[in-house]
Image (spheres, rainbow, N blue to C red):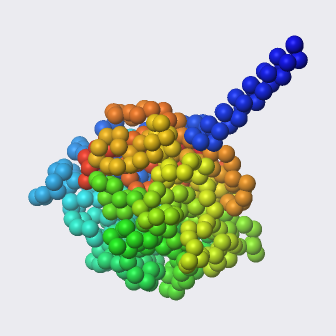
Amino acid sequence: MRTATAGSSAVKLFVLWLFLLSTFRMFGQGTITSYRLGDNTGEDWEPAIVADGSYVYVLWPHYAATSYLDSSGATCLPYNPKGTGPSTIDYMYFQSSSNGGATWSGVTIPRCPNSAFVVDAQLAVGANHRVYASYMNGTQQYAPIMVIYSDDHGVTWSAPVDATVGGKGDKDILLVDKNNNVMVAYENGGKQHVSVSTNGGTSFTAKQVTVASSGIAFATGGILDTQGNAYFAWAGTTQNGTGPTKFYVQQSSNLFSTFSVTTVDEGEGGPSVTGAGFDFFGGSIQIAVQPHTPPTNDRVIVVYNAGAGSNGAPERIYTKYSDTLGASWNIPYNSSSWPNGSQLSLAPTGVWHGFPSIAGTSSIVKVIWMDNRASTGGNYICTSGSTPGACGIWNVYMRSSADGATNWSDEESMIQAMPYKNYSTAAGFDFPDGDYSETVTDGAGNFYGVWAEAQYKIEHRVGTGDVYFAKF
């Protein structure tokens, strides 16, 4: 009798263990604490992050009135959500930490916007701890892309310089090498461009580059390897974002005087959701390197979300790597069968995925992304970007690998910080308010992620957006 009872107990414990294991695999172990940044007024969107030793910097657009002066002491244009008259609809907010994210400075405005909006924030670190920022600043879809820099950890900033040299652009990605050569990739009317400054951002030379043969291709990621090679990752879409998306990697060893382009993979067009903006849930690609000791090449690793099956179906998270400086990939692109990368997410079929990012050191690579697997009752749908609760419950998930290719860890998820209003649950939030996340490393084993979340968003500037940070 005692034997039977012990056996039954053992079976029950085993079943419980299997249940807990499956639950952890489905929802991720909520072991990473996130923290809210900003000034407690919300209305924040699409943050950028960079690390330089113990210093961590974050930059994002803030869509509400503010009383802050900029770093030069100037009073910025007044806030007007309609963007009419001598006004602006948002301001770039900057926040820094000097102790690896343990505590943060107050919010500042690096430079006032000089016209109706500032979006697409980017950050990079150059020589002598100089911090660079880039962002769009204009009144139309294609706008001047401004570059500024700070030599005192973001206390004061240089005057903005237009990297497009009057050409205008969209979706800038910023790279700065160890000599303070500045590279900015951007899109304009279906044409791709890279602007380069060889004098630390004082002036630029703009150059059209051919990455995608047709359609619109957005620069969505960039990285420098330890050999000085520069890489930009591009996502090219057609038919106003509803057509297939191709993923490209552009590589150059001479500041894009010459360059090569490879096609990494392809995916079906992303789901179209009312109120969510152009191709909001469409494919995006991010890129990282894992440093190797010469003469071995650094490993170049990409992570991307791509659609499989029917057009407009929810997308999944994929990864590939290259040990040939991006010239070839471990799983070659197949024009008749795609996407064919290695899947990272363990979420059930039907879960909506997007917004991945990646960073690596010589000993570990980490990836984060967002998905809505925590939705109540497994209702993995998203029908509106402007109706509260219509897109399920989203969270940020993380996996790591020692080589960026094999033996990926169990998933972990973020424990959500309490935002200032319209909180969902500790398991997640109601809408990813911003069409990317970013992950960086300080090279010493610390990884930092940043993203934005909200109850809902309307026209990118009315909602309850908040910027969140995590160290993992």
Considering every residue shown, the one lying at the far bottom of the view is 258
Displayed quadrant of residue 251: bottom right
Residue shown at 29% from the left, 43% from the top:
387
Displayed quadrant of residue 291: bottom right
Considering every residue shown, the one lying at the far top of the view is 1
Location of the N terminus by quadrant is top right
Q: Where is residue 338 in the image (x, y as percent from the top left)?
A: 56, 70
Front residue (pair 291, 355): 355
Image: 424 above or below 404: above
Residue 254 at least partly seen: no
Label count reads: 0
Front residue (pair 333, 464): 333
Front residue (pair 202, 229): 229
Residue shown at 66% from the left, 63% from the top:
290
Image: 441 above or below 423: below
Location of the C terminus by quadrant is top right
Residue 425 at least partly seen: yes
Q: Is residue 277 left or right of residue 430?
A: left
Residue shown at 33% from the left, 76% from the top:
188
Q: Position of residue 137 (x, y in %)?
A: 28, 64
Q: Where is residue 455 in the image (x, y as percent from the top left)?
A: 34, 40
Residue shown at 35% from the left, 40% from the top:
389
Image: 370 above or below 405: above
